[in-house]
Amino acid sequence: QVERRSGRPRSEDADRAIINATLDLLGEVGVTSLSIEGVAARAGVGKATVYRRWPNKEALIVDAMATLKGPLPRPAGRSLREDMMTLLDSQMAGYEAARQRRIYACFMGEVGRHPDLARRYIDTVIEPRREVMRGVLRAAVARGELRDDLDLELMLHVITAPVLHWTMRDPERQLDKSLVHQFLDATLEGLAPRR
């Protein structure tokens, strides 16, 4: 989330322009070549305007990437399948437009070479979503919908990996939601308690 600071009121238009410029440049030049100067020029603001809002490039990139994810999903808690569909649909929403898929492909292809950025992105953007999924999985175990001997951390990766894989494999291609739902159904069937 964008950090709010005391002092002069901020312009929401400037915030939006800076975030959009950051995302555009991430998709065009990637993490390494992105600069505050380039973002400021693309956004039509001064470099000082960017630095008043974000202390460095990493903080700006993380906030920009967070906007692609949207708000945290709120599963209803009625059934594992319904909750997982809510979570996966939220994940896929971030990949619906070709622009979003290009940005993710560029970002994921480079973030491993920037450990501080990777850590901040995981802690700020990914981990809160993983915690929602952990809660869904724990509730499903408690309701008897999942086996109680499962490694929940492994399940997080098993369930979310297909969306990331398909996006990285072909950023120009629209995700097939029905395929993701089929994969989820097959996975959940395999993880159900043995009768």
Image (spheres, helix red, strand yellow):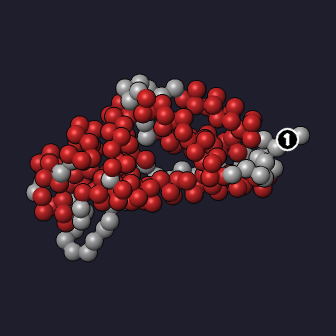
Mark 1: secondary structure: loop
Residue shown at the point (18%, 63%) measured from the top left: 51
- Residue position for label 1: 194
User: Residue 127: x, y in percent?
Assistant: 50, 57
Task: Tell me, yes or no, if residue 56 can be seen here.
Answer: yes
Task: Tell me, yes or no, if residue 20 can be seen here.
Answer: no
Q: Nearer the viewer, residue 62 or 75?
A: 62
Residue shown at the point (77%, 52%) measured from the top left: 149
User: Residue 32: x, y in percent?
Assistant: 24, 47
User: Residue 41: x, y in percent?
Assistant: 11, 48
Mark 1 surroundings: few (<14), some (14-19) or many (≥20) residues within 10 A: few
Residue type at numbered disc 1: Arg
Residue 151 to residue 9: above or below: above
Q: Residue furthest bottom?
A: 6
Q: Is residue 17 left or right of residue 181?
A: left
Residue shown at the point (55%, 53%) measured from the top left: 130
Q: Is residue 180 left or right of residue 62?
A: right
Q: Is residue 188 left or right of residue 40?
A: right
User: Residue 40: x, y in percent?
Assistant: 14, 52
Q: Residue furthest right?
A: 195
Q: Residue furthest front?
A: 113
Query: The N terminus lies in which quarter of the figure?
Result: bottom left
Residue shown at the point (43%, 47%) measured from the top left: 69
Residue 94 to residue 60: above or below: above
Residue 33 to residue 53: above or below: above
